[in-house]
Amino acid sequence: MKNHTPTLSAAVLCAALLSATAAHAQHPALQKAGDVQYVCGGIGIDESTAMRAAMKDYPLSLLFATKSGDYLAKIQVVIADGKGREVAQFQAQGPVCLLRLDSGRYTVKASADGGKTIDQGVEVGPAGTPGKTLDYRF
C-alpha cells in the first residue's frame, strides 16, 4: 500500500497558503465623498475576498451585479439623508463598496450604464451594530 501522507500534506499546505494570501489581500484605499468615507473594489478573487471579509467592519455595504449574478463596476452612486439632502456622490469602481457614514436613514440611488436606476432605503445603526448590505441587481 502506498503512503499518501506527503501528497495530503502538500495539499493542506497549499490550501493554507492560498487562504493566508487571500486573508492578507488588501482592498483599495479609502476615499471620501462629502461626509462619507468609502472604498469600492472587488475585482479579482483576492480583492473580492478581502472586500467581502471587510464588510463586517463597515456600517453599510453595496453590491452591484447583473440579474444573472455577474459583477458590475462603474456604477453612479448618490446617497441622500433622511431629509432628502445629498450627502455623497461617487462612481463605484468595483462591484463591492464599503461605506462609513453616520447612523441614520438614507436613500441610496445606484445608476448603471444604459440609464437603469435603483433606489433603496436603509437605516444605518450606531457604531458597533451589525452593518447593512444593499444588493443592486441590474
Image (cartoon, grey):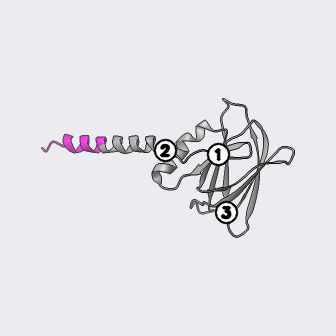
Q: At x 65% / y 34%, what residue is drawn? A: 130
The residue that appears at 74% across and 46% down in the rendered structure is 34
The mark that comes first in sequence, 1 or 3, is 1
The amino acid at mark 2 is Gln
Q: Quadrant of residue 106?
A: top right
Where does the magenta region start and end?
1-13
Q: Residues within 10 Å of mark 2 (few under 14, many from 20)?
A: some
Residue 138 bears which disc, if any?
3
Q: Is residue 102 left or right of residue 23?
A: right
Counting residues from the start of the chain, the first of labels 3 and 2 encountered is 2
CA gap between label 2 and label 1 equals 14 Å
Relative to 82, say whether 93 is above or below: below
Circle 2: element type:
loop
Q: Which residue is mark 2?
A: 26
Counting the numbered discs, the total is: 3
Q: Residue at x 52, y 56 (%)?
A: 43
Q: Quadrant of residue 128?
A: top right
Question: Of tags 1 and 3, which is closer to the observer?
Answer: 1
Mark 2 and mark 1 lie on one chain; the one further toward the N terminus is 2
Reading the image, the residue beneath label 1 is 38
| Horizontal side of residue 109 vs 73, given as left or right | right
Q: Position of residue 84 (x, y in %)?
A: 85, 48
Element at label 3:
loop
Q: Tell me whether the residue at label 1 lies in contact with that at label 3, contact meaning CB atoms closer than 8 angstroms.
A: no
Relative vertical location of residue 67 with respect to residue 48 in this rendering, above or below: below
Q: Are marks 3 and 2 in contact (CB under 8 Å)?
A: no
Q: Please name the predominant secondary structure of the magenta segment in the image.
A: helix
Location of residue 73 by image quarter: bottom right
Q: Amino acid at mark 1?
A: Tyr
